[in-house]
Amino acid sequence: MKFVELDPASLSPRDMSHLMNGVVVPRPIAWVSTIDVDGNRNLAPHSYFNAVSCEPPIVQFTSTHSSQHDPAGYKDTLRNVRATGEFVINVVSEELLDAMNTTAIDSPPGVDEFQLAGLEAIASARVRPPRGALQGRARMSRPHVDADRRRDHDLWRRAARSRSRRRVGGRPCVLRAAHGGRPSGRV
């Protein structure tokens, strides 16, 4: 097998995106729900997401795109997490791909993506942002994580055009997963 070495600095943002998206596969997508300070709901997918530590438990996602609706370029998700310190990670399953794609738009602040995608919002246990469920169907069986923000980091300080890209880490307050289906009885 022949390999090619690539210098990331020589790649266009589009080429880098395609390569990075293929580094970890399959890659879970975090469907992050937040609320703003006025209680408006937001739901947006973030394809750079993972659990990064179990002691202490830390989950993180990265807000990688900018918004035309914010002077600093921050998407609603990032702005809401910074303002309230809370978010819920819903893990996207295949049957929710169309709804997830509906919520991937750069809508103005105050637009309720739960409503836009026809999803029911369910109250979370320990944080104010709701978690999601399919409207009129079985509840999402994928895990949910209610988390509070520990820190966010500017990923690209030197690139002015990328100033809105931030990594957000959170401490899980509640982990919710469907029980059963495994012989060991583990979640």
Image (cartoon, grey):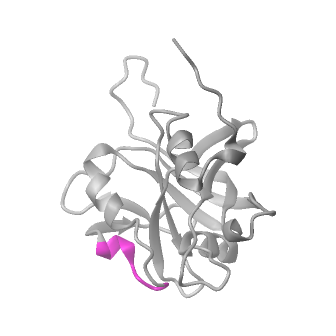
Q: Which residues are magenta?
A: 109-116
Closer to the camera in the image, 99 or 55: 99
Q: Residue at x 68, y 58 (%)?
A: 168
Q: Position of residue 81 (x, y in %)?
A: 63, 70
Which residue ends up furthest to the top in the rendered image?
Answer: 1
Residue 45 vs 20, above or below: the answer is below
48 sits to left or right of 122: right
Q: Position of residue 119 (x, y in %)?
A: 29, 66
Q: How many marks?
A: 0
Q: Position of residue 77 (x, y in %)?
A: 56, 70
Q: Residue at x 69, y 36 (%)?
A: 54
Is 89 magenta? The answer is no
124 sits to left or right of 97: right
Which residue ends up furthest to the left in the rendered image?
Answer: 136
Q: Quadrant of the C terminus?
A: top left
Q: Residue at x 59, y 52 (%)?
A: 12
Is 110 magenta? The answer is yes
Q: Position of residue 11 (x, y in %)?
A: 62, 47
Looking at the rendering, which quadrant does residue 183 occupy? top left
Residue 49 vs 36, above or below: the answer is above
Looking at the rendering, which quadrant does residue 178 occupy? top left
132 sits to left or right of 40: left
Is any part of residue 48 visible from this angle? no
Residue 92 vs 101, above or below: the answer is above
Is any part of residue 72 visible from this angle? yes
